[in-house]
């Protein structure tokens, strides 16, 4: 199994290999539907044929705005098989944000689920380079080839009720059945387009854009394969018997790597939920005999709340992978206790194809995100660019070097040069390493609070706040202060039925933190703003 994966140059070949090796093995479970690897490959090959008919070629960008769905997996491999570039787009985005990504990436085609078609339609007038719109539903995909002309309005896409557009509408429409097995009309096992795995872009992943507009991280086939499936999951020994629950958004690199590429490369089964629902998730984990949960801390927190009073069988579960956002020690311990499975915390970025560090299954260290994965190097960099020695007293910016580091930001050489220096990617995260190379993240460089010349790391304050029995979660930011430069402000979400006042919170913090770290302001809110991967959007707090 391992050798077949390492022979792959174009990631799309992983699906062909599994379809030949284990055609009747279960690839995807989605509600009542169960797809074998033969089903998935046939569906993907048929979509590739349709993309070829629409003129999609090597290096063309194809935007995909779809919820978690088997067709996301089929499209993923269909696009890569052509040597084209997949541009995953978050379904939560609005038209202006979608327009920016499609325009910045110069996407030639767009695949969108009908539920989100309205947002895309509003963006279309700004997208003169977009020639193909592919509208899908739970039952069908409609493909429309659109030729834009400045002197005429855009034609409207066809829907299930209007049927095939007329030639006079300027569209070429091909209808694909989603709920039935599709046979490609040509070669049932087509060859993929040859690629240079080190240089050709496979995914163009747009960062969350905490400052300015999102930038597209260009990820090569090698970038992704250097992280998934073997390196980040090396100690987990995953094989064709494993069943992975798909609750992460597939549009993010964590979800694309853990739920799309890894299962296919290893022959596992993906049990996909269209969206995250805590109750449905825990019920599915038990019913489908899930062995691996890749998730973010917020998802685990909500699932643990659903488990209160429930008796479910999690005996098949082996590992709970937790990454993409800070997590408290208390939550890690609760996850391990309630799910009776090993919790593995890791760390990575879109710019490193999701790779960075991961705790070894046999030697996890609570509070650490683990040592670097194989093939990568991790360094702690000081303000002057020097590499700092191990120790909690040597906090600096985390830097990553190795085959997972992106090729750069699409169309932004200056922005690329700002973050990649001498092949080291400067992550913007602050941390330190211990003597054994385990990494500890203490916060974001741009989130660093400086009060009267003293550095305050928000995560340290958040870890204390979460220890209060009545606190569900908390986020800490710096706000301007006329005399001290900045002061600490805490946003606190209380558990249902709980009550706290500001003075009680401050008094508790003063027992565990130096005086200058204690929040000067405390605001109680109902929920922390988050993106779809569970990261708290601190830019929305003030």
Image (cartoon, rainbow, N blue to C red):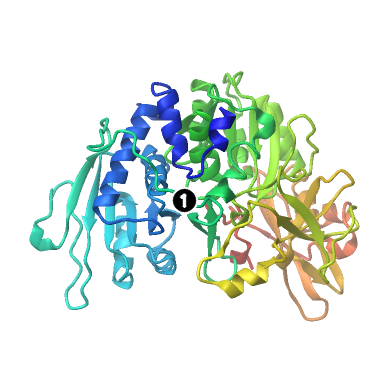
Q: Position of residue 285 (x, y in %)?
A: 53, 27
> Which residue does the numbered mark 1 point to in the structure image?
195
Q: Residues within 10 Å of mark 1 (few under 14, many from 20)?
A: many
**Left or right: where does residue 373 sit relative to residue 313?**
right
Q: Position of residue 67 (x, y in %)?
A: 40, 46
- Considering depth in this image, is 361 or 221 the residue closer to the camera? 221
**Left or right: where does residue 318 sit relative to residue 390?**
left
Q: Quadrant of the C terminus?
A: bottom right
Q: Position of residue 190 (x, y in %)?
A: 34, 38
**Left or right: where does residue 393 sit relative to residue 18?**
right
Q: Which element type, helix, strand or loop, lies under badge 1?
A: loop
Residue 171 visible from this viewpoint: yes
Query: Can you tell which quarter of the image residue 233 is in?
Result: top right
- Considering depth in this image, is 151 or 313 the residue closer to the camera? 151
Q: Position of residue 197 (x, y in %)?
A: 53, 50
Please name the residue shown 61% across and 69% down the image. 416
Please name the residue shown 47% across and 45% down the image. 10
Residue 36 visible from this viewpoint: no
Query: Can you tell which quarter of the image residue 291 is in?
Result: top right
């Amino acid at each position: 199994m391992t050798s077949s994966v390492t022979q792959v140059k174009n990631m799309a070949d992983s699906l062909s290999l599994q379809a030949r090796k284990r055609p009747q093995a279960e690839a995807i479970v989605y509600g009542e539907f169960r797809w074998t690897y033969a089903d998935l490959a046939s569906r993907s090959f048929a979509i590739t044929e349709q993309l070829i008919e629409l003129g999609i070629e090597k290096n063309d960008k194809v935007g995909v705005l779809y919820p978690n769905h088997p067709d996301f997996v089929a499209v993923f491999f269909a696009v890569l098989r052509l040597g084209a570039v997949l541009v995953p787009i978050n379904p939560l985005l609005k038209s202006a944000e979608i327009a920016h990504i499609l325009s910045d990436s110069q996407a030639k085609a767009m695949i969108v689920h009908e539920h989100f078609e309205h947002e895309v339609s509003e963006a279309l007038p700004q997208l003169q380079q977009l020639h193909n719109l592919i509208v899908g539903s739970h039952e069908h995909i409609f493909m429309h080839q659109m030729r834009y002309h400045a002197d005429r309005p855009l034609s409207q896409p066809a829907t299930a009720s209007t049927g095939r557009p007329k030639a006079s509408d300027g569209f070429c429409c091909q209808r694909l059945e989603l709920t039935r097995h599709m046979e490609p009309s040509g070669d049932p096992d087509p060859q993929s387009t040859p690629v240079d795995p080190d240089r050709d872009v496979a995914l163009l992943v747009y960062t969350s854009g905490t400052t300015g507009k999102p930038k597209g991280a260009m990820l090569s086939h090698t970038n992704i394969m250097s992280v998934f499936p073997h390196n980040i999951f090396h100690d987990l020994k995953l094989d064709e018997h494993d069943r992975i629950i798909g609750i992460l958004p597939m549009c993010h690199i964590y979800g694309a790597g853990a739920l799309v590429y890894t299962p296919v490369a290893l022959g596992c089964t993906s049990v996909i939920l269209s969206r995250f629902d805590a109750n449905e998730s825990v019920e599915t984990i038990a019913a489908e005999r899930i062995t691996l949960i890749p998730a973010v801390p917020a998802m685990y927190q909500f699932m643990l709340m659903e488990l209160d009073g429930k008796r479910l069988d999690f005996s098949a579960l082996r590992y709970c992978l937790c990454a993409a956002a800070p997590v408290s020690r208390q939550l890690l311990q609760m996850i391990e206790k309630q799910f009776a499975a090993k919790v593995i915390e890791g760390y990575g970025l879109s710019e490193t194809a999701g790779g960075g560090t991961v705790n070894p299954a046999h030697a996890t260290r609570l509070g650490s995100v683990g040592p670097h994965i194989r093939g990568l190097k991790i360094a702690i960099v000081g303000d002057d660019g020097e590499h700092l020695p191990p120790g909690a007293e040597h906090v600096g910016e985390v830097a990553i070097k190795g085959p997972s580091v992106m090729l750069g930001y699409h169309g932004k050489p200056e922005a690329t040069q700002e973050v990649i220096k001498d092949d080291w990617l400067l992550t913007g995260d602050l941390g330190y390493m211990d003597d054994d190379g385990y990494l500890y993240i203490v916060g974001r460089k741009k989130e660093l609070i400086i009060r009267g010349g003293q550095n305050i790391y928000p995560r340290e304050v958040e870890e204390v706040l979460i220890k209060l029995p009545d606190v569900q979660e908390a986020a800490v930011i710096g706000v301007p202060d006329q005399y001290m430069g900045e002061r600490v402000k805490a946003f606190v979400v209380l558990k249902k039925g709980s009550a706290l006042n500001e003075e009680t919170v401050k008094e508790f913090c003063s027992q565990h933190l130096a005086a200058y770290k204690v929040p000067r302001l405390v605001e109680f809110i109902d929920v922390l703003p988050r993106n779809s991967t569970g990261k708290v959007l601190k830019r929305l707090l003030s």
